[in-house]
Image: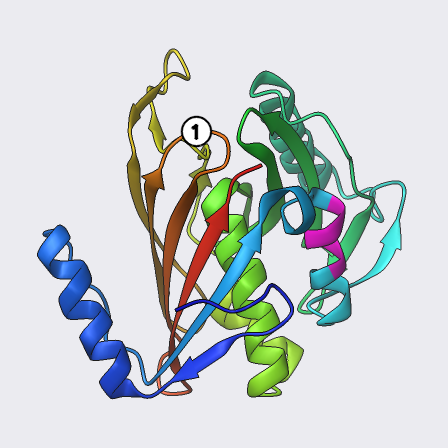
Amino acid sequence: MTSSRRTFIKATTLGSAALVATRQRRSSFLFIRPSTNYTLDYTLSVDGTADRVFNTFLSSNVARDTSDTLPTDDPDVVAAVQSAQNEFVIREFTNNETPFAQRRNSTINPLWGRQRNEKLGPNPGFATVQVQRNFLSPIAFTGSTTAGIDSALRVLIADENFDPTVLDNALIPVQEQFEDWGTWEGDVNPETGEPISGASLTSYRTRFGDVTRRYDVEEPGPGGFGIITFDVNGGDRFKTRVVVRVEFS
């Protein structure tokens, strides 16, 4: 069951458990059992553009203080941002460029986006910078990971009214050198960029816990759809599953 893109369905843990059982019959992967479960629709041509996702970060106050240029001249931050920018160009995420925004936790953690136009719809890619053991490195996430974070932000703001710092700490990756360059066609060959599987799985650490994201192409090709299962383990604060039906253009 899905909802319109402006509404969502919240289920109890019992409903979540039933969904877990259904998904496990189709896959050997195990997922965190959440305490809340949400289901919503995501239309790529409308919801999946880089500027619209960027607006979610701003409206949730996870990011703020936009700037057309990087709001710091710290050489380590500049180098990390340039590294991410180079990867965006190599992987053709060069459309619909957003400005830079600052994350809530620090002025040296910028957040910004770029877009690659694929045959199934726009693919929004985002990057930020993390500091770990006094070492700065870029973090990049695209496709179904971006859509999962975007969807989780929207439902958690609407239903749970979490503080923006909590959302930042529970959803944004902090894993060193984390990169998730996904496509809407599933896993790709890292050397050729060609799709190799209609499913993909990733997990990453956050400041509060971890996130596991699975993506399955259910009906391939234009007019089809895929399913994102986005499990958020926010430590002792909350556990949430967001299931997103992604409608291809």
Q: How is the image coloured?
A: rainbow
Q: Classify residue 209 by image quadrant.
A: bottom left
Q: Residue at x 71, y 69 (%)?
A: 104
Q: Quadrant of residue 237?
A: bottom left
Q: Is residue 97 left or right of residue 199?
A: right
Q: Which residue is mark 1?
A: 221
In the displayed image of the protein, which residue is found farthest to the right? 68
Question: In the image, residue 239 lies at what x, y percent?
Answer: 36, 80
Number of other residues with Cα within 10 Å of mark 1, as a class: few under 14, some 14 to 19, many 20 or more: some
Asked if residue 68 can be seen in this view, the reply is: yes
Task: State the image coordinates of residue 117 (x, y, percent, origin top left).
Answer: 63, 27
Residue 219 placement: quadrant? top left
Q: Residue 131: within the magenta?
A: no
For mark 1, give the secondary structure: loop
The residue at the far front in this view is: 223
The residue closer to the viewer here, 163 or 102, is: 163
**For the magenta stretch, what is the residue range?**
51-55
Answer whether residue 131 is visible to the viewer in this image.
Answer: no
Locate residue 231, reporting x and y percent: 35, 66
Please report the residue visible at 44 percent of the width from the left and 39 percent of the height from the top.
Answer: 224
